[in-house]
Image (cartoon, rainbow, N blue to C red):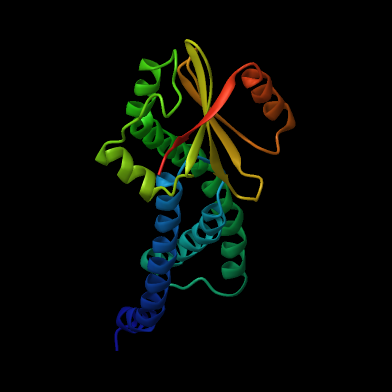
Amino acid sequence: MDTSTTTAASLRRPCIVSLAVLVVWSTLALWMAWLLATAWPYELLPPLVGLTIALPGVLFRGGDLACMRFTRKRLVRWWRVLARLLALPAGIVLAFAAIGPLDRISMARFERAIAPLIEQIHGHAKAPCPPAVVYTKDAALQGYLDRSRSPGKADLHHKPGRFVMSVMGGSIDIDGSTIYYDSRSRVWQKFHNDSVDKREAFAALVKDLDNCKITLR
């Protein structure tokens, strides 16, 4: 039997196994990335852990398949160990590099969806609180709020002609985060609630403003 035929036959099963495992790791990585990109705004979320687990697996299995494809040999013994050791930090670095883009996608989706509500509040800035004014949510905004599991209410800190809207954001721990919009800057910002400096700065921002609630869901 031809040597090349023998080699191809011996690699068939390892290739199938590596390909199957690669599909599993890739599916997990894409699912975690999708969760991070479509989530309610946050300061890190648990799916990041899943992403840091999945991406080293993607890199290792991808390298294993590439080795079999181009060298007609498997990664064995210490080469295999070395490949795993290299894939682990590389995958973790790749996962953390993805945090920024995925976070920006999540935040951009939130800002687009919530913009009509913010414009309504701007239109009632002199007296923005319910029940004096009723804010409406179109189907697109309501669908976003439901899908992203938004908190039930937002705080509207206000005085005539100015307001700061704040809402609880997600995080990887129990402390949560705060997302807020200042009508003066017209910019959304956020911070993790364990940041004492940012928490105090936000408290100073709203300390002279009255407060009421707006229902989100």
Left or right of 179, for residue 117 = left
| Residue 166: percent from left, percent from top | 53, 30
Left or right of 188, for residue 147 = left
The residue located at (40%, 22%) in the rendering is 121
Q: Nearer the viewer, residue 127 or 25?
A: 127
Q: Residue furthest front?
A: 132
The residue located at (35%, 21%) in the rendering is 119
Q: Nearer the viewer, residue 54 or 161?
A: 161
Instruction: Decide: is 89 above or below 8.
Output: above
| Residue 13: percent from left, percent from top | 38, 82
Where does the C terminus fall, quadrant-wise? top left
| Residue 22: percent from left, percent from top | 41, 67
Instruction: Decide: is 34 above or below 24.
Output: above
Where does the N terminus fall, quadrant-wise? bottom left
The residue located at (40%, 77%) in the rendering is 17
Left or right of 206, for residue 55 = left
Q: Nearer the viewer, residue 36 or 209?
A: 209
Q: Residue furthest right?
A: 196
Q: Residue furthest bottom?
A: 1
Residue 2 seen by the camera: yes
Instruction: Decide: is 99 above or below 79.
Output: above
Instruction: Decide: is 64 above or below 161.
Output: below
Q: Disc count in the image?
A: 0
Residue 180 seen by the camera: no
Quarter occupied by residue 141 = top left
Q: Residue furthest left?
A: 139
| Residue 204: percent from left, percent from top | 68, 19
